Amino acid sequence: MKINEKQQTLLRMLPGVDHILELTKSETFFADIPQTVVVNSIRAAVEAQRHRILKNDSDTSEATLSAAQILEEVKHLTRVAMTPNLTWVINATGIVVHTNLGRSLLAPEAEENLSLIASRYSNLEYNLAIGKRGSRYSSVEDILCEISGAEASMVVNNNAAAVLLCLETIAKNKSVIVSRGELIEIGGSFRIPDVMAKSGGILKEVGTTNRTHLRDYEDAIEASTGLMLKVHCSNYSLIGFTAEVSLQELVELGTKYSIAVMEDLGSGTFIDFSKYGLMKEPTVQESVATGADVITFSGDKLLGGPQAGIIVGKKNIIDDIKRNPLTRALRIDKLTLAGLESTLRLYRDEEKALQCIPTLQMLTATIEEITQKANQLVEKLNDINNSRLHMQLIKLSSKAGGGALPLLEIPSQCVSIKIDGISANSLERYLRKSDPPIIARIEEDYVIMDLRTIQQDEIVIIVSAFENILKRD
């Protein structure tokens, strides 16, 4: 590449890394920053200016190449480097269990216990009663059995792992009968047939996409059949001319032929949401009551705990699963166990669970409660007293999210916001780049704030973000 005279002049003006490094030593901003971070930021800032010069960037001038200007860019790059990549955000989307935003929020009790276990030694694999090595699963097994009614239980790191582990234990090199309409794909392109293939189970599809009958299962049974699997379609719904076999019917068929029956509930729940005006979702207790041999579900979706794969069922099968060498690779860590145990203990009192577990509280919050928060947001935004800022209350729907209750639309109260001179896309981007980031949605050229998923103490932060945007733009 040929460099012209102006470029050569600008390149000669570019300060060296050593010179900028010397300047940082007199700046208190860099006092507690590791030198490796400072040096890398300087190199990046200088290299960025060199790149602009070589591209003949019209914005490059003597002023932008000054040591003082580059030092400011170094400070910016250093801030970015020192800021954790994983950060908290404000969820204004109205999607309660938002997979991209970390799914469920932990209850204060779970947060407190997690912090304690994280900062101290614990009896993770130590039996305090006998003073010898114990099992990490014991901390949650009793409470899981108490709530669900199951004989035994264990937990692994997520529900996909739970399904894989159960299939590999029960049906490796055996056929697994599944309805064609239940061969679902969950987030991240993980498909039931793929998980089954990895487990060593041999898929045997029965029925059609929309209709499967008990006779389809019975006709498929053969000497090599090891399992009948029912998958709850928690992330989509078939409507119209449909038919499916109930778990109870499968259990009766399994008993007749001495074949194990497993149900993957996906997003499991201990609460019957239909009691609170929401769509009916099968509970873990109902599945256990059918006599199914093993049931799997998630800990971080409708349950409202940390990410985990929970397995409950008959003791003889759970014991086999615990002995599977794969459990070592899929085991749950102490922090997840701490959060999960505290969450599960709240379910001993359903009313307390609804009040204390954020996922349950948000899903069952009344429209009156949501409207009260929406009015607070509008009132505080009006206090900014800026004629460019326009807002209005609007009734829209929230969603459960997390691959659960796909048809459920929960009436919610939202605030639609517009700023003169700023497009909805630009406003959404400004909010996303706020500190902390605010994640909203856009409808009809308005930014929408759904108050169902906005926490009470986040309202003032949202107002402050709008104040900053109005001052800057």
Image: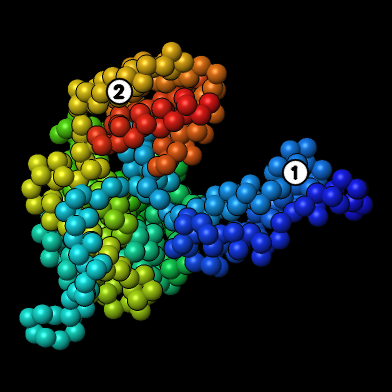
Residue 340: x %, y % from top left: 22, 59
Residue 229: x %, y % from top left: 34, 57
Q: Amino acid at mark 1?
A: Glu
Q: Amino acid at mark 2?
A: Lys
Residue 340 can be seen in this image: no
Front position in the image: 331 or 369? 369
Give the residue displayed 19% in from the left and 46% down from the top: 357
The mark nearer the N terminus, 2 or 1, is 1
Q: Name the image colouring.
A: rainbow
Q: Are marks 2 and 1 in contact (CB under 8 Å)?
A: no
Vertical placement of residue 124 versus 423, above or below: below
Mark 2 neighbour class, 10 Å CA radius: few under 14, some 14 to 19, many 20 or more: some
SS of the residue at dot 2?
A: helix
Give the residue displayed 44% in from the left and 30% down from the top: 468
Q: According to the image, label 2 marks what residue?
A: 380
Front position in the image: 160 or 418? 418
Callout count: 2
Give the residue displayed 80% in from the left and 53% down from the top: 11
SS of the residue at dot 1?
A: loop
Residue 238: x %, y % from top left: 39, 36
Tell me where residue 394 sits by quadrant.
top left
Q: According to the image, label 1 marks what residue?
A: 62
Front position in the image: 35 or 13? 13
Residue at the front extreme, as displayed: 26
Mark 1 neighbour class, 10 Å CA radius: few under 14, some 14 to 19, many 20 or more: few
Vertical placement of residue 96 versus 20, above or below: above
* Left or right of 343 on screen, residue 162: right
Residue 131: x %, y % from top left: 11, 86
Give the residue displayed 8% in from the left and 85% down from the top: 130
Q: CA distance from mark 2 to mark 1?
A: 45 Å
| Residue 223's disc number | none
Number of the front mark, 2 or 1: 1
